[in-house]
Amino acid sequence: MKKTVLIAEDEEKMRRVLEVNLQDHYRVLLAGDGEEALRMFKDNEVHLLLTDLRMPQRDGLSLLREAKRFRPGIPVIVLTAYGTVESAVDAMKEGASDYLLKPIKMEEVELVVKRALLQADLVNENRQLREEIKSLYGVDTIISQDPKVMEIMGMVRQVADSKATILLEGESGTGKELVARAIHLNSQRAPFPFITINCSAIPRELLESELFGHEKGAFTGAGKRKIGSFELAHQGTLFLDEIGEMPRELQVKILRAIEGYRFMRVGGTEEIEVDVRLITATHRDLKSAVETGDFREDLFYRLNVVSFKLPPLRERKEDIPLLIYHFLEKHKKEVRGKILEVSDEPLRALQQYPWPGNVRELENCILRAMLLTRSNRIEMEDLPPEVRGEGAGALPAIPRDSEELRRMKRHLRKKAEDELERAFLRDALKRNRGNVSKTALDVKMDRRQLQNLIRKHHIDAREFKAVSPINPKD
């Protein structure tokens, strides 16, 4: 379908030239003055307005203002003679996309029109994407009827537009990043970047460079300048997940950076100033970490301006049915839109299970059951053995046809692979007392590849630090 271009031009010959040259690619509407153009603009879906500045009854600048009032995103291109360049500048200030000087060149007109329409499409697409993201991650998408969570969401709305640093506390899987995104998307910073850094997933020797960037030649391997997360998040939000795992020597640099939002890249000599909203999260008790000396007290109080502690799922079991039906809806494409329900017995089992992995574990459990169920109802045999209160190993169901057999075999293969990977990681980390670098060397694996595997299985390498190694000489 052709896009519509409205041409407002009082010279008939010029109108005809523009029409002839544009009509192959666009639906062209013609108006001889500003008043006629405004009437046509209101009565038609116009995608671009091309207007002369000097016209009888209503000039191009007045037409531009009215068009922008009715449709703020409409691209407008103004035509002007050499003697009225100042008027073109005024038009640009009023929101014109571009201007063309008479006598015009048709190749230039076609290029400018095409460019303005493409830019408008990109703006509209970005706006729609932002709305879709907000509908997925906004405050209203937090599924809960628990009074504590509802109180937190109310406070989130209150503080979303401030620049105050926010500390999110809670166990793994309770939705800390989801809340951080909701804060960002409900603030005026929503059009700008939301940058996430997991402080526990990046080697300490690289974390400073990830945060602040580095100059070319700052250290071995620094072949070119790198822009850090603080700069990338300019005008937006920087989310530092697992801030409690940040090395103590870096904590003071973070403190200095957020006191004035000024810092230097690694190897740099000039300070860089940024406008960033900082949100941090941790599953650790930072107050206890301050008492033991693992976390700086001054940084803790700088981060803890506003804090929210997200309750674990076991403390808000009334949310489990809501979340179950939310996940059934969310993942229905995985089962080709099949409508599913949960029988009473498995629903009771799901509510009684303590969910050590919190909401993340519940979602994975529901998706698994949706894939394995043989009917439109999720039954006990579709749940993992631990949720049923049984030992592992039994088949959850018997396939009814070849397609179901293939699907279940794929799932069970993946489950066996996951269990093998998890056992492999735990054994390797235990041997190396939780040291990820040593573990990578020990198992002959790239460090980043190992870290990705550890994250995939939600394993906390620190729990192995106190475990005695198999080899006492290690």
Image (spheres, grey):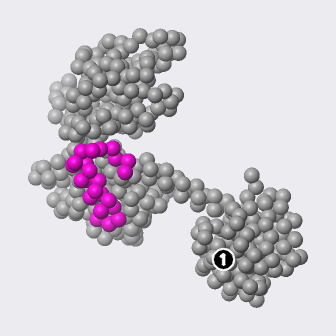
Closest to the observer: 107 or 184?
184
* Quadrant showing the C terminus: top left
Residue 434: image x %, image y %?
A: 25, 35
Main secondary structure found in the magenta portion: helix
Closest to the observer: 439 or 325?
325
Q: Is residue 128 left or right of residue 64?
A: left
Q: Is residue 316 left or right of residue 98?
A: left
- In the image, the segment drawn in magenta is 140-164
Q: Is residue 197 above or below residue 301?
A: above
Closest to the observer: 239 or 445?
239
Q: Is residue 279 above or below residue 398?
A: below
What's the residue type where badge 1 is placed?
Answer: Leu
Q: Residue at x 73, y 79 (%)?
A: 34
Q: Residue at x 34, y 33 (%)?
A: 324
Task: Kindly state the secondary structure of the residue where label 1 is placed.
Answer: helix
Residue 210 makes an appearance in the image? no
Q: Residue tagged by mark 1?
A: 64
Residue 148 makes an appearance in the image? yes
Q: Residue at x 48, y 27 (%)?
A: 338
Residue 381: image x %, image y %?
A: 33, 16
Q: Quadrant of residue 45?
A: bottom right
Q: Is residue 305 above or below residue 53?
A: above
Closest to the observer: 387 or 47?
47
